[in-house]
Image (cartoon, grey):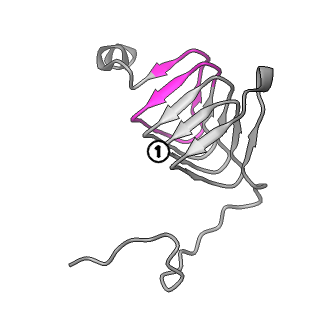
């Protein structure tokens, strides 16, 4: 039987350094829209501005712009997600800029055509 992995088990400390990032923040976008993250791990320095994040991991310095959705994904350091973009079931490398209105992980054929 394997031990249960639990990030909040203080007997098995995780030693990391997130650098000089400020705390994560969830801010309002246009017309009262509020940034949300549900069942996700959000690192310091992340800004979720009027977007929805579900079942995902956001690394330090990520910025998720208004009206975008990130679900079942891992965004590495410094990823920028544009307005109205959708990221689903993806691992996005460091410092990638996802443009406004992009769709990633929604249509496999569209993803393959993009490369």
Figure check: 4 above or below 22: below
| Residue name at image x 78 percent, y 26 percent | 32
From the top left corner, tell me how far across and down residue 26 is, in percent.
73, 42
Figure check: 66 above or below 39: above
Q: Quadrant of the C terminus?
A: top left
Circle 1 Cα neighbour tier, 10 Å, few/some/many (<14 / 14–19 / ≥20): some
Which of the 4 image quadrants contains residue 28? top right
From the top left corner, tell me how far across and down residue 89 is, in percent.
39, 35
Look at the image and give the residue range highlighted in magenta: 82-103
Q: Name the magenta segment's main secondary structure.
A: loop
As drawn, the residue found furthest toward the front would be 32
Question: Is residue 40 within the magenta segment?
Answer: no
Indicate left or right for 105 with 8 as reference.
left
Q: Nearer the viewer, residue 44 or 115?
A: 44
From the top left corner, tell me how far across and down residue 9 is, in percent.
49, 78
Indicate left or right for 32 with 81 as reference.
right
| Residue name at image x 65 percent, y 67 percent | 17
| Residue name at image x 56 percent, y 38 percent | 53
As drawn, the residue found furthest toward the bottom would be 11
Q: Which residue bears the numbered disc 1?
A: 55
Figure check: 32 above or below 1: above
Count of numbered labels shown in the rendering? 1
Question: Is residue 99 within the magenta segment?
Answer: yes
């Amino acid at each position: 039987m394997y031990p249960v992995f639990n990030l909040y088990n203080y007997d098995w400390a995780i030693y990391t350094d997130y650098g000089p990032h400020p705390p994560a923040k969830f801010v309002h976008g246009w017309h009262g829209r509020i940034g949300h993250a549900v069942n996700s791990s959000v690192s310091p320095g992340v800004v979720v501005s009027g977007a929805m994040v579900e079942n995902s991991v956001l690394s330090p310095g990520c910025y998720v712009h208004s009206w975008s959705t990130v679900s079942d994904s891992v965004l590495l350091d410094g990823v920028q997600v544009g307005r109205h973009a959708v990221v689903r079931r993806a691992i996005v490398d460091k410092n990638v800029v996802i443009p406004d209105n992009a769709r990633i992980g929604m249509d496999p054929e569209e993803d393959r055509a993009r490369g």
